[in-house]
Amino acid sequence: MSEWYIWGAIALLTLSTLITRSGFFLFGHAVKLPPRLKHALSYAPAAAMAAIVIPDLVLADGVLALNLANPKLLAGIGGALFFIATRHLLGTIVTGMALFTVLRLVI
């Protein structure tokens, strides 16, 4: 590949990114979503987070590991219980990581 081809590709990709993302900033106020859709979209961040976190907690080496020998799962449950009891996010992170470290060393 020549140098102009690489720079041209970078320029075109930059332009396409700017066009696709600037539409939300330039025309976002003009788009009115129905209330039901707004309500449904409010669950999107939690659903995305669950889709990222839960497979990491329940899979060990690509195999479903729903047992007491899975330190990630036990630490996740402990962190969730801590959050339910206190509603303190930083404490939840510290508690979950501390539990995971202890359980990883013990199990």
Image (cartoon, grey):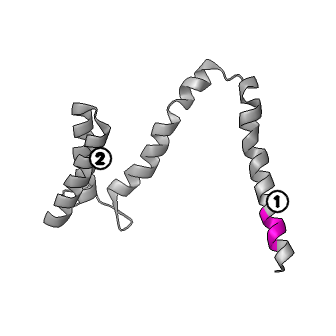
| Horizontal and vertical percent position of residue 106 | 13, 64
Which residue is under mark 1? 12
Bounds of the magenta span? 6-10
| Horizontal and vertical percent position of residue 15 | 80, 53
Q: N-terminal of the two: label 2 or label 1?
A: 1
Task: Determine whether, in the image, residue 90 is placed left or right of residue 29.
Answer: left
Find the residue positioned furthest to the bottom.
1
| Residue 93 numbered mark, or none | 2
- How packed mark 2 is, by other alpha carbons closer than 10 Å (few <14, some 14-19, many 20 or more), is some
Q: Amino acid at mark 2?
A: Ile
Residue sitting at x 24%, y 51%: 75
Residue sitting at x 72%, y 30%: 28
Q: Amino acid at mark 1?
A: Leu
Q: Along the line of sight, which residue is nearer the eye, 90 or 78?
A: 90
Task: Determine whether, in the image, residue 41 is placed left or right of residue 76.
Answer: right
| Horizontal and vertical percent position of residue 32 | 71, 22
Task: Determine whether, in the image, residue 36 is placed left or right of residue 84.
Answer: right
Above or below: residue 47 compared with residue 33: below
Q: Which image quarter holds the N terminus? A: bottom right
Task: Determine whether, in the image, residue 74 is placed left or right of residue 89.
Answer: left
Q: Which image quarter holds the C terminus? A: bottom left
Give me the C-alpha separation between circle 2 and circle 1.
Answer: 41 Å
- How packed mark 1 is, by other alpha carbons closer than 10 Å (few <14, some 14-19, many 20 or more), is few
Above or below: residue 73 compared with residue 21: below
| Horizontal and vertical percent position of residue 94 | 25, 48
Quarter holding residue 83:
top left
Q: Along the line of sight, which residue is nearer the eye, 28 or 53?
A: 28
